[in-house]
Every structure is written in structure tokens, then in C-alpha cells.
Image (cartoon, grey):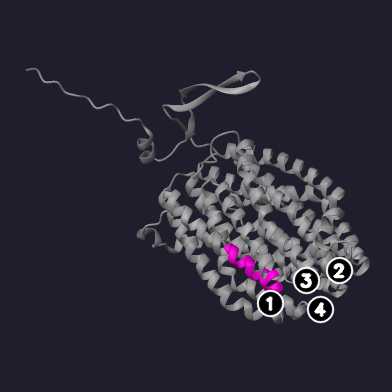
Amino acid sequence: MATSLTTGRPWRVILLFTVPLMIGNVVQQMYHVADTIVVGRLLGVDALAAVGATGGLLFLLLGFAWGLTSGFAIPTAQAFGARDYAAVRRSVATGAILSGITSVMLTAGAPFLSEPALILLQTPPELLADATQFTVISFLGAGALMFFNFLSAVIRAIGDSRTPLIFLVVSCVLNVILVIAAVAWLGFGVAGAALATVIAQAVSVLLCLEFVRRRIPELHLHRDDWRITRADVTEHLRLGLPMGFQASIIAIGALIVQVRLNSLGAEAVAAYTAASRVDGLAVALLQSMSLAVSMYVAQNYGAGRPDRIRRGVVQALYIAVGGAVVLGVLMVALGGPLVRVFVGDAAPDVVSMAVSMLIINGVSYTALSVLFVTRGALQGLGSTVIPTVTGIVELFARAGAAIVLGGIMGFVGVAWSNPLAWVCAAVILVPAYLRAHRRLATMPSAPMEVTPTTPIALVGPVDGSMNVEAIVTQPVRLPQTSSRVRRALRPRRPERTRVRDR
């Protein structure tokens, strides 16, 4: 259901919005975890390394698609915060058209680039065939990934982070079943793992569309909504392209890391793949805060509430840093057992390398949490330059560390590439947000209006529990809206009955 993020205590609103995102991101990581466990246990270390060798290339293009659709949802969130529902529908139509064009381009061109790109990345010859199959099938299903991300972003933009989670859980369960069936029962190998993921994502798209049709009238598009203007396209591309390029820039750094790993051999690739799957679960939890802050800031910016933005971002930083410390401790303490889930005890060198990477990342999660919150806040404000610049900085930091430290320290040097990239990006993002924070302090907040009667539950302790004692009505403050909406919110006066004297 559509939910406004412009009222309520900021930390509570952000946290409640974040929790479904966290669960959803963890569930989405389970796509990759399921593939890795099934492939690693049933097909062996080489097959696991082949799937891992595709990570950088897939992230380069599919990460671009994810960033693009996330950017398309920011104008939707801003329009929803301003209660301009015609602009909400027009934003959705614009994003859908642009997402469709991008999907066609990815599906038509990317599969032909798969094998040449993998060869260019110096993929070990024994891994090339399986890696090519996995990549081609993943790119052929790019449209399913693109539209699931877009529809999920739009639903979250109107304040509903729970529904995409439900669909993602259903899709993940289906994915696990299909991976086991395709690899263990039908013998399709790594190609079956990729196909299972594509089918599961396509099901998610259908579920999102049916939910919008049944439950979200604010997103029901009319014929006039599809008549988008050049200004609509320009605004969506202004926000979407930098976020897409930012993801691609980061992916280029990941590709350089992949080249360095490939030069270290199949065991190094397998170790990095296993560690990345475990690390991805922790990073997904922290990344959820970035998306939640972005949507929160966008809605409140549209509603003219800079005061709420300032409070919310500071409170989000406290929550994110606290979570990062807990995740870091868990990663350091439980890294070994978690890695063995993927590769078992038959490859002790792989386990040892993977654990060292998890320790390095775990002690660096605090910097990552600050990066995510400040970047999400700037993106919610519509800023594109600084987030893009930090993506370029991450590229050079990650690539430089992988090349230089990888040549000196081997796998451990490569493992330091991600934390160094996080720190370098945070050094730029924090001052940039502080400047925006000060600017927000000078902006006037939109005047507020009061609704006449809103139900409020009064609760009290009964034998140590909480019990609803009564329901009363009390005025609550809402952001000021347009005169048309204000008139609609006012209670109607009772009709007068005229009595004529006879």
C-alpha cells in the first residue's frame, strides 16, 4: 500500500521502511547463494569459479540497469511526496518506456559480447565454456531483471517496501527449486543455474504487475499519461543515467579485480567468489539503508520538509554505523564456518583465502555504512555529480589496489581493494553531504495543515501487557498540499434540510 514518509518520527519511519528492504536484499542474495551452493557442491570448484568469473561482466551491464531504474524512481518519489498524482503516473510511464528501450538494447547486444569479453578478462581456459553459457543466458533474461527492479523501485517510491519483499521471497523460493531441478535432476550444469534465475525474476515481474493492477490505483496509467514530454525524459535520464553509470564505473573496477584474480588461478577465483557470497549478505543489509534514505529524502524534499531530511539522515547514520559494527563482529567470528557451507572441507586453501577477505571487509563496514547513507541522501536530493565522482574514485582506488597490492601481497592485496575504495568514496561524500545539510538548514519548511479528526488508539498496561483501551480522534499535522487536495480532505458539512411552513 502507498505510504507517506513525510510524517512520523524520522528514525522510526526510516527503520520501518528499511527492514523489508533488508530482508529483500538478503533474499535477493539468496539467489546467488543458492547458485553457489548447488554449483559448488554438485559441479565442483571449477564450476564455482566459472560462475564467479562472470560476476564483474554481469555487474557491468546489469548493474547499470539496476542503477538506471533506481534513478527513474526518484522523480516518482518526489511527486508522491508533493501529492501530485498526475506527475506520479507520468513519471512511471516515462520510466517504463526508458526501461523497455534499455532492455531491448541489452538483450539484443550483450549476449554477443559475452565470450570476447571473458577472453579479454583473461578468464582461465578451463572455465571459459561454462562462464560463457552462464553469461549469455543471464543477458538474454536482462529484461526480466530490468522490469522487476523498475517495478520494485516504483512501488518503494510510494512508500511500500513490503510488497516487493513478498514477491522477492516467492521468486527466491522458486529459484532455489528450479536451480536444484536444473542442475541436480536435469543435469543442465551452470546454464541451468542461470536459466532458473531468469525464470524466477520473470515470475516476479508478473506478480508486481498484478499487484499494481489490483491494489495501487495511484499507479494506474491512462492514455494521457503515456504522452510524455522531452522534459520528462530529460529529468529521468538526468537522475537515472548517473546512477547507472555509477554502478558501471564501480563494475569496471570489479572487472579489473577479476582480471587480477584470474591471473592468480582458479583457487583464488573460487575463494573470492565464496567470500563475496558471504560478504554480499552483510553488504546487502547496509545497502538497504541507502535506498531507504534515498526514498525518505526524495519524498520529504518533494513535500518541502528540509527539517525532516536533516533529522532523518543523522538518525539513519547512527542506525547504519551501529549495524555495521555488529555485522563486522559477526563476519570476523563466523567467516570460516560460513565459507565451508559453499566449498566444504575439501579445499582448505580456498577456505583460508576467503576467510582472510571476510576479516578485511568486516573491519571496514563502518566506512561502507557512512558511504551508503550519505550517497543515498544526496541522490534523494537529486544530486548526481558527487555520487558519480565517487564512483570514479572507487574505480581508481579499487583498480589501483588490486593491481599494486595484488602484485605485492597476492590474494590478500586484492582483498583490500574494496575497503580502500569505500574509504576513498566516503572521504568525498561526507563533506558533500555536510554542505547540503547546511543548505537545508537555510531552507524554509512548507507550512503545515491540520486534519480535523484522525483515529488515535489509546493503550495502557493490563497485567504487564498492552491493551487497546479506546479509540479517540485527535488532529494531526500533515504537509500542506494543493488547494484541490485540501478541499478533498476537508469534512463535508451536513446537508441542511429545508422545512417549509405550511
Q: Amino acid at mark 4?
A: Pro
Q: Which residue is mark 2?
A: 268
Which-is-in-front pick, marks 1 and 3? 3
Vertical order, 60 against 363 (above or below): below
Label annotation for residue 279: none
User: Could you tell me residue 25's position as x and y percent?
Assistant: 66, 53
Question: Is tag 1's residue or tag 3's residue first in the polypeptide sequence?
Answer: 3
Question: In which quadrant of the rendered view does residue 454 lie?
Answer: top left
* Identity, as a three-letter code, of the amino acid under mark 3: Leu
Q: Is residue 239 visible?
A: no
In the rendered structure, the answer to whether residue 489 lies left or right of residue 382 reads: left
Give the Cα separation between the discs numbered 3 and 4. 17 Å
Mark 3 and mark 4 lie on one chain; the one further toward the N terminus is: 3
What's the CA distance linking mark 1 and mark 3?
Answer: 15 Å
**Foreground: disc 1 or disc 4:** 1
Disc 3 or disc 4, which is closer to the eye?
A: 3
Give the mark, 1 or 2, whose residue is nearer the N terminus: 1
Q: Amino acid at mark 2?
A: Ala
**Counting other residues with Cα less than 10 Å from the Cα at mark 1, is it few (<14), some (14-19), or many (20 or more)?**
many
Q: Nearer the viewer, mark 1 or mark 2?
A: 1
| Residue depicted at x 56% and y 34% | 8
Q: Is residue 241 above or below residue 481?
A: below
Crowding at mark 4 (Cα within 10 Å: few <14, some 14-19, many 20+): many
- Lower sequence index among marks 1 and 4: 4
The residue lying at 16 percent from left, 23 percent from top is 498
- Do labels 1 and 3 touch, CB within 8 Å? no
Q: Magenta region: which residues? A: 185-201
Secondary structure category for the residue under label 4: loop
Residue annotated with mark 1? 133
Residue designated by label 4: 124
Secondary structure state at the residue bearing disc 1: helix
Of the numbered discs in the image, which one, if any, rests on residue 43? 3
